[in-house]
Amino acid sequence: MTRSDGRGLRATVLAVVLAGLVLPIAAGLWHTVAAAFGHLPAIGKTEWSLEPWRQFLALPGAWTSVKLTLWTGLASTALSLLVAVGAATWCYGRLGPRAIGRLIAPFLAVPHAALAIGLAFVIAPSGWIARSVSPWATGWSVPPDLAIVHDPLGLSLILGLMVKEVPFLLLVMLAAMSQVPAAAQMRACRALGYGRSQVWLLIVFPQVYVQIRLAVYVVLSFALSVVDVGLVLGPSNPPVLAVALTRWFLAPDTKLILPASAAAIAQALIVLFAILIWRRGEVAVAHLGRAWICRGTRSQTWTWSSSAAAVSAGCCLALGMLALIALALWSVTWRWSFPAALPEMFSVGAWLRPGSGWGRAALNTAVIGVLATGLATVLAVAWLEGEDRAGLPRARWAEGLIYLPLIVPQVAFLYGLQVAFVWAGIAGGVAAVIWAQTLFVFPYVMLALSRSWRALDQRLVSSAAALGAGPIRRLLAIKLPILLRPLLTAAAVGFAVSVAQYLPTLFMGAGRVPTLTTEAVTLSSGSDRRVTAVYATLQSALPFLVYSAALAVPAWAFRNRRGLTGDPA
């Protein structure tokens, strides 16, 4: 009876995922594809044609935007992976996973847009770094005329993506280490005279990479299609393609919708093309690695390389920390003239005017985040519980559907999804934004929760069943209490993802649902730094508070049960 109930629960959850997540993405892609080929009855276009593609390719800077997209996406992902691998190599055996987790946790909680704004405050010609070395080292009494932020090569965009993605990749590597017998392999290879770094890079890391390949593809897809970070740090004339087509979609001239739709499909094809390039690179690197192993060469170059990468990772973390401090400083600054290294006058005036904007944006952000995260968490628990009750193996094809929103670029289907929502009469409100954000929150909650859920000792559940506890009681009295920490951590991850959503909020809310992210990105283009800093600081603080609660609540609830707090016995 329980097994059949489990099959029914699993089928129900799969139906909800298909109807609520997969079908909207498919509908969004269909409407975008239709508009890309000239079919958009809303503006009187009913003939199918290739004219939107010709218009897209004829738009000023279109080809440059495509090249910038490929360059910044591939470069930032490759550099982030190299730095994270080197940092993991150096940390192995020196720092434990818990210590590293505490070190990088703040950067995982901070949304991309807030970190990008803070980084702009640090590296800009009038930023904190220039102020700290002026005028005594540079002779600058006014900000230099240097294109650092919004540079035409996209270097600041690459740096901003690295500051955020290096900690993420380092975390997923540490999680994957539990699936690899690294300690035994390390001892065996060290006995043969190989250095620790060489063993990690040539023997351990290839096994780890198999576990994290999907995460790397997600990072690559995000880097190729990011909009909010591109608006804050990326090239401006022309911008990367995701930023350019977003501007075309939002332009008053409705004639730009068709070429923008063509550009959105081109964006999806670019991501697919980049993943294929990356895959070919994986094969080439694997071939070189095998050839190096067969030669049996011992070299200290590996140690130096890993040390350099670890230093680079430290620099990324330092820049991220400076960015967060800069946001906090600017939010309480009244006067900070160049080249003073610190504010000359402080004021909390920008914080005392919630009614002028940030109060409503903060409330919307919190409400949407809680509801979207709650829906995603309930759905994830139902999915995993149905899997347990049915006694069936993991359906990897179904999990592939769950992670679809992380691979397909948002800009490729969000406009079409907006069209579908308008047709259904649910666009332009908070409910549409919650639904759209749940598309992206749910996969992250599943990623964060599934490993811990499946690692639960099933003997505890079997013992409860032997004592007469039914499926619901076993779930509520055994599984959820034991898994409270990973459950709340997954919810915190989901909330942070919700807070960071820019395009879903902008498109599905039709610009009428202000959140901290949409307002902060808008203000970053030239508004008062103090006001921008207030929004970005709040945007950073909300996920951090939720993460803190996710750690504090289990520690308090299980203060007399050391085995459930995660502390060593």
Image: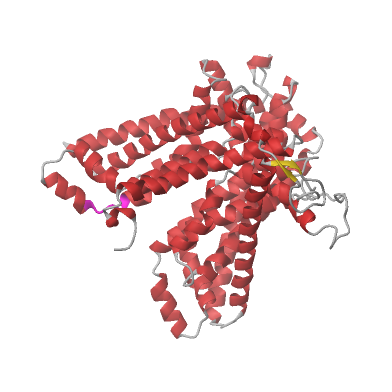
Residue 309 lies in quadrant: bottom right
Could you say which is closer to the camera, residue 315 or residue 422? Answer: 315
Q: Position of residue 3 (x, y in %)?
A: 20, 39
Position of 112 compared to 241: left or right? left
Q: Is residue 197 visible?
A: yes
**Where the N terminus falls, by quadrant?**
top left
Residue 270 lies in quadrant: top right
**Where the C terminus falls, by quadrant?**
bottom left
183 lies above or below 264: below
99 lies above or below 256: below
Residue at the spot 72% in from the left edge and 31% down from the top edge: 247
Residue 29 lies in quadrant: top right
Could you say which is closer to the camera, residue 538 or residue 235? Answer: 538
Q: Position of residue 337 (x, y in %)?
A: 81, 46
Q: Position of residue 360 (x, y in %)?
A: 58, 26
Position of 359 compared to 51: left or right? left
214 lies above or below 59: below
74 lies above or below 420: below
Q: Position of residue 486 (x, y in %)?
A: 37, 48
Residue at the spot 55% in from the left edge and 40% down from the top edge: 408
In magenta stretch: residue 58 = no
Residue at the spot 55% in from the left edge and 81% down from the top edge: 295
Position of 525 compared to 409: left or right? right
Q: Is residue 392 visible?
A: no
Per the picture, the main secondary structure of the magenta-coloured stretch is loop
Could you say which is closer to the camera, residue 174 or residue 384? Answer: 174
Residue at the spot 47% in from the left edge and 59% down from the top edge: 210
Q: Which residues are magenta?
A: 454-458
Could you say which is closer to the camera, residue 365 or residue 183? Answer: 365
Position of 426 compared to 481: left or right? right
